[in-house]
Image (cartoon, rainbow, N blue to C red):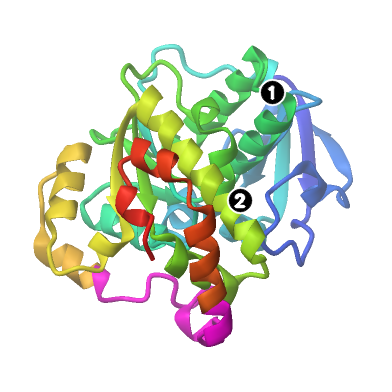
Amino acid sequence: MAAGYLYRGGAQPGLGWKVVSRSDIGHLTPETLTPAMISRAPLIPYCFDFGGRTIIFSAAVDPKKAMAAEFHYDYLRSRSRCFVELPGQSIRLPQKASFPSSILLFSPGRCGSTLLAKVIRAMGNVCISEPDFYSQAAVYAAKSGGLRLDESRLLEIARKFLVSPWMQSTYPIVLKMRSHANHAPLQLLPEGQGPQKVLFLMRRFDPWCESRMRAFSNTLNDNIRLYKIALNALLKLQQGAECLLLDFDELNGESLSWAEGLAEFLGHSFDADAIRRVLGQDSQAGTRLAKDQLKGQLPAELRQEIAWMWRKEAPKELLAKVGLSHYEST
């Protein structure tokens, strides 16, 4: 790889829920570096500079510990103390390397996707929760009318770096997306893997909306817009890939038939005891989204308004197309 840049220091503090971007390290001074300076440092893709056609990596963070974190991007932000920037055209991946395939997990957020990621790990699958360069790519693609060929190549290079610590895996690596990925889902699918497999987790609007309002500051109109974006993303993925649709209510039910179907989809054996142990935990304990960190129950008047608005705004035709007609009612 040709020379790039080294940035000593961490990402800006206080970034919160913002999607990763080059500005996260805008306060750091670049130093010219050579391949010899980074030959032994693990590189985890952090974000892109699409204008400069470069990938910015977090350097010297343990990728397997980052994989196990509830939120991959947040783990990198809090622990990275140096970053490496490399031009995409200079990165040469091993020609004969067989990188593991990837299955992307989509959702509108606040519907148990972090819990599902832990279930997938309990099945023996690697699952990386919210590598946020995918969010950045989706938002960029939606604004620019799609990724160009060289931009898609940057995304695929980043994916291969991300999954490279598991080169010996016989199972696909599951990559859990943030909700931003719904803006351009087909643009994010890995290249050259044959028939694409994806997962999509959905939840009824009313409890989903209430959960978002307890966790974030979105308005009711914001939530309706985001939910419809998720439904449209689901439709595109059902039409353009082999998509397994999962329902939040099933994750919280008595039957584990959904988990058995998921295991089959991933090519795994089924261990009911391991899954039940995971389901009995608060999947986001210790994070800003832990149950004890959220606001209390919403006022009755607001809950009634949410139900009324959904009856008015529910896209019945779209719900029918994606197989969620039962979501029309509250």
Q: Count the marks: how many?
A: 2
Q: Where is residue 34 in the image (x, y as percent from the top left)?
A: 74, 28
Binning the other alpha carbons within 10 Å of mark 2 as few (below 14), some (14 to 19) or many (20 upward) gives: few
Residue at 63% in and 13% down: 149
Magenta highlight on residue 286: yes
Gap between marks 1 and 2 measured at Cα: 19 Å
Foreground of the two, 226 or 164: 226
In this view, 157 is above or below 163: above
**Is residue 130 among the parts visible in the rendering?**
yes
Residue 42's image quarter? top right
**Element type at mark 1:** loop
Magenta highlight on residue 130: no
Question: Magenta segment, which residues?
Answer: 279-303
Residue at 12% in and 63% down: 255
In this view, the mark in front (1 or 2)? 2
Q: Mark 1 points at which residue?
A: 145
For residue 225, the mark is 2
For residue 330, the mark is none
**Given the image, on which type of amino acid does mark 2 rest?**
Arg
